[in-house]
Amino acid sequence: MSLKKKPRPDDNDGQGLPEDVLAGLNPMERWGRRKTVFFLSGLVVFSTLALYAYSYTMKPLAVEPGEVSADMAGKLVCVHGVVVSSSLCGSGWGSFVIGDVNSNGSGGGGNCTVFVPEDLAGEGPEIHPGDAVEVVGRVQVYNGIAEVVPRDGGDIRVITFG
């Protein structure tokens, strides 16, 4: 009785996959260079868009205005506070400063700058000192100061008017 393995017809005598099967696995030989490059480019674009969509749906980190710092650069945060001062121009872009909310509703503790880019001008609500606001945005550092930059006008919400 022999325990020697008998080669199967599709085993190519134990030498691996047949050449015609291997050629079918190589996309360059199967589709040609142009189609392969097009496919891979599409895959890269799709992956980039998927990552962008995922980052847009990520849950922001809830922080107090005084906790926003330069080491948080690039992170998505949600900040609640009272508007202490505003230097928004008439069209709605510029910056405003929010402070921590104490139990009595007044500003106190640390402050945080919120920068509203010019391309978001007019998209968000009107902001005035004394308003209690919630801002969702990415932390960026400008001239050594950490600031929160909203992604669109809906990322700025007035909770109560001051």
Image (cartoon, grey):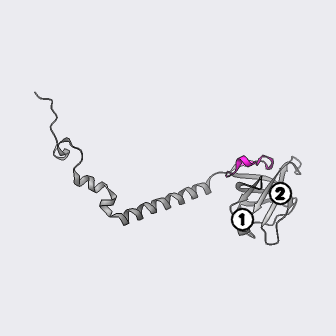
Relative to 14, is 150 above or below? below
Residue shown at 71% from the left, 48% from the top: 72
Residue shown at 74% from the left, 68% from the top: 118
Quadrant of residue 55 in the image?
bottom right
Residue at the farthest left position: 1
Quarter of the rendering occupied by the N terminus: top left
**Badge 2, how many Cα within 10 Å: few under 14, some, many 20+?**
many
Give the percent coordinates (x, y) of residue 88: 82, 66
Magenta stretch holds residue 142: no
Q: At numbered mark 1, what does the secondary structure look like: helix, strand or loop?
A: helix
Give the percent coordinates (x, y) of residue 110: 84, 48
**Badge 1, how many Cα within 10 Å: few under 14, some, many 20+?**
some
Quarter of the rendering occupied by the C terminus: bottom right
Q: Find out whether the residues at labels 1 and 2 contact each other: C-beta distance under 8 Å.
A: no
Q: At numbered mark 2, what does the secondary structure look like: helix, strand or loop?
A: strand
Instruction: Return the residue at label 2.
Output: 97
Judge left or right: residue 1 versus residue 59.
left
Give the percent coordinates (x, y) of residue 152: 69, 64
Q: Which residues are magenta?
A: 62-75
Residue shown at 62% from the left, 57% from the top: 56
Instruction: Return the residue at label 1.
Output: 153
Foreground label between 1 and 2: 2
Q: Decide which of 66, 102 is in the foreground and name it.
A: 66
Q: Amino acid at mark 1?
A: Gly
Q: Amino acid at mark 2?
A: Val
Q: How many marks?
A: 2
Magenta stretch holds residue 74: yes
